[in-house]
Image: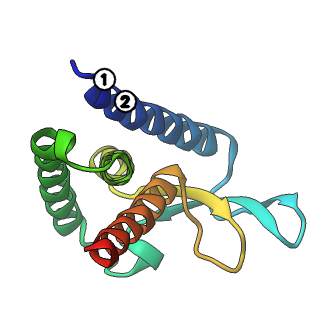
Amino acid sequence: MSGKKGKEIGIIAGILLVDQLTKFLANKYLALNQPVAVIKGFFYFTLVHNRGAAFGILKNQLPIFIITALAAIILISINLKNKQHKQPAVYNLSLSLILAGGLGNLIDRIFFGHVIDFFDFRIWPVFNIADSAITIGAILLGWNICIRKSVK
């Protein structure tokens, strides 16, 4: 296994582990839809079962979400495997983050029929580690694409 591939697998496994562990703990210690103040008026833990996509859109479309996630996971995995040595590290990191987040939420959908969310800042929809990884990965990917286009 090459060094780069090992890093990506480590990132994916680490994020997936933390995501699933925090969701397990949220499910065990939080009551559904009952906020627990961490910083009153700013940050709460609120267990939510999200049956939709981002921001709860397209609720109750489980088969679509599973098929879409599987397709994205397969395409990203192929891309990482085939282009890993030809791409900048930030590109591979961004795809690894998106892949880990996609896997984390896919696991929830397959085993529970919904995604477990619990970070609640009150000004943003409730989210989880997987959502954060996807968002950070997408921002890094967009930034990398813009930087590479501006250099050419």
Q: In the image, 67: left or right of 65?
A: left
User: Callout 1, which amino acid?
Assistant: Gly
Where residue 119 is drawn, which disc sits there?
none
Q: SS class of the residue under badge 1?
A: helix
Does residue 28 appear in this view? yes
User: Which image quarter is the C terminus in?
Assistant: bottom left
Residue 52 x, y percent position in the rendering: 37, 72
How packed is label 2: few (under 14 Cα within 10 Å), some, or many (20 or more)?
A: some
Residue 80 can be seen in this image: no
Q: Are marks 1 and 2 in contact (CB under 8 Å)?
A: yes
Is 48 located above or below residue 8 in the figure?
Answer: below
Residue 20 location (% of width, % of height): 47, 38
User: Mark 1, residues whose alpha carbon is within 10 Å: few (<14), some, or many (≥20)?
Assistant: few
Q: Residue beneath label 1, please?
A: 3
Which mark's residue is nearer the viewer, 1 or 2?
1
Residue appearing at x 37%, y 37% in the figure: 12
Where residue 89 appears, as percent x and y from the top left, is: 35, 45
Name the residue at 41% across, 70% down: 143
- Left or right, 79 with respect to 151, comes to left
The image shows residue 47, relative to residue 85, as above or below, that is below
Q: Position of residue 63 (x, y in %)?
A: 17, 63
Residue drawn at x 36%, y 65% is 144
The quarter of the rendered structure image containing the N terminus is top left
**In the figure, 126 relative to 84: above or below?**
below
User: What residue sits right under mark 2 in the picture?
Assistant: 7
Residue at 30%, 30% (x, y): give it.
4
Compare residues 9 and 33 and report the one nearer the observer: 9
Q: Based on the displayed image, in which of its 4 quarters is residue 115 positioned?
A: bottom left
Instruction: Reply above or below: 115 against 110.
Output: below
Query: For the view shown, which residue lies furthest in the top direction?
Result: 1
Amino acid, disc 2: Lys
Of all residues, the one furthest to the right in this rendering is 40
